[in-house]
Amino acid sequence: MAVTVLLPGVLRADAGGFGHLSLDLPPDATLRGALDQLAASYPRLDRRLRDERGTLRRYVNLYVNGAECRGLAGLDTPVPAGAELHVIPSVAGG
């Protein structure tokens, strides 16, 4: 099943310059599985999204069809067919 990953400009260099990526996932896919597949093709992007334990970095917000994954099941959140995964890093400063 196909899902789309949408990336902000600040992460595009780590994904070959792409602003959106298409993933072909199994029907029972989770967010963790989607990130594992991204990591296989874009290891630099994975290091920006997950720490050495494989957990989502504190400053990264990941949305599945508009719902923030931490309010769902975290990395175990199911990813339905046709889903849009939005990656939004936190912005600090002032």
Image (spheres, rainbow, N blue to C red):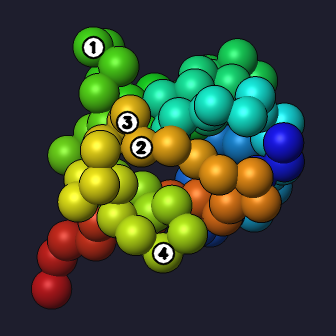
Q: CA distance from mark 1 to mark 4?
A: 26 Å
* Residue at the image position 27 percent from the left and 13 percent from the top: 53
Instruction: Give the crowd class for mark 2: few <14, some 14-19, many >=20 residues within 10 Å.
Output: some
Q: Which residue is mark 3?
A: 75
Q: Secondary structure at mark 1?
A: loop
Q: Is residue 60 visible?
A: yes
The residue tagged 2 is 77
Q: Are marks 1 and 4 in contact (CB under 8 Å)?
A: no
80 or 67, which is in the foreground? 80
Mark 1 or 4: in front is 4
The x and y percentages for residue 16 are: 80, 42
Between the C-alphas of marks 4 and 2, the distance is: 13 Å
Secondary structure of the residue carrying tag 2 is: loop
Q: Quadrant of the C terminus?
A: bottom left
Res. 77 image quadrant: top left
Q: Amino acid at mark 2?
A: Thr
